[in-house]
Image: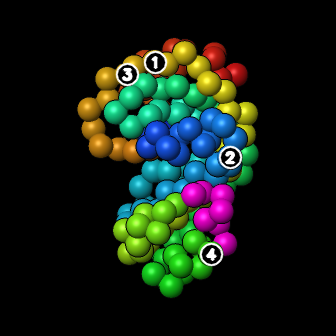
Amino acid sequence: MSNTHLVILKKCYLDKIIDGSKPVELRLLKTACQPYGSVAIGDKLFLKQSSGPVCATAEVSSFQEYNNLTPEKIAKLKAVYNHLVFGTDEYWAEKSESKFAVFVWIKNVKSIKPVMIKKLDWRAWVVLKAGNDFGLLRSADIIH
């Protein structure tokens, strides 16, 4: 059974995903929190602009997870993958102490009519569960 995720993105990255130029979403994490350990091929994604609406859907086509990262290992990941994730030098420097990484390859990106949700916490990635889904799972038919 696949999961459905809410992915919060800065507008510049969301725009690149929607226009097809950014095929991979990266999360560098200090702790093993979502999406680490919770992504699978075929999972559905709701893509939400930070401080804005949910405005696209997508599907996970592949993913890679890393743990026990060091600044040196992160620099190697940057060299290999940055052309796919478009991270700024500032982003990579800010995340250089991360211990976990999740690279998510995205396919079937579709723009949807913008949907505002009431999300008050700071989580940038949420695995949606019935009753704790910001009302999005009721409209999940838009991503099938």
Residue 21: mark in rendering: 2
The residue located at (38%, 64%) in the rendering is 31
Q: Is residue 28 above or below residue 143?
A: below
Label 3–label 1 contact, CB within 8 A: yes
- Indicate the amino acid at tag 1: Val
- Residue 125 is left or right of residue 14, and the answer is left
Residue 79: mark in rendering: 4
Q: Secondary structure at mark 3?
A: loop
Residue 115: mark in rendering: 1
- Residue 79 is left or right of residue 120, and the answer is right
Question: Which of the two marks, 4 or 1, is nearer to us in this view?
Answer: 4
Residue 117: mark in rendering: 3
Question: Which of the two marks, 2 or 3, is nearer to us in this view?
Answer: 2
Task: Find residue 20 and report its image quarter.
Answer: top right
- Magenta-drawn stretch contains 101: no
Q: Which residues are magenta?
A: 80-86
- Indicate the amino acid at tag 4: Ala
- Residue 88 is left or right of residue 140, and the answer is left
Measured in 3D between alpha carbons, the distance from the residue under mark 4 to the one under mark 3, in whole angstroms, is 36 Å
**Callout 4 crowding tier (Cα within 10 Å): few <14, some 14–19, many ≥20:** few
- The mark that comes first in sequence, 2 or 3, is 2
- Indicate the amino acid at tag 3: Ile
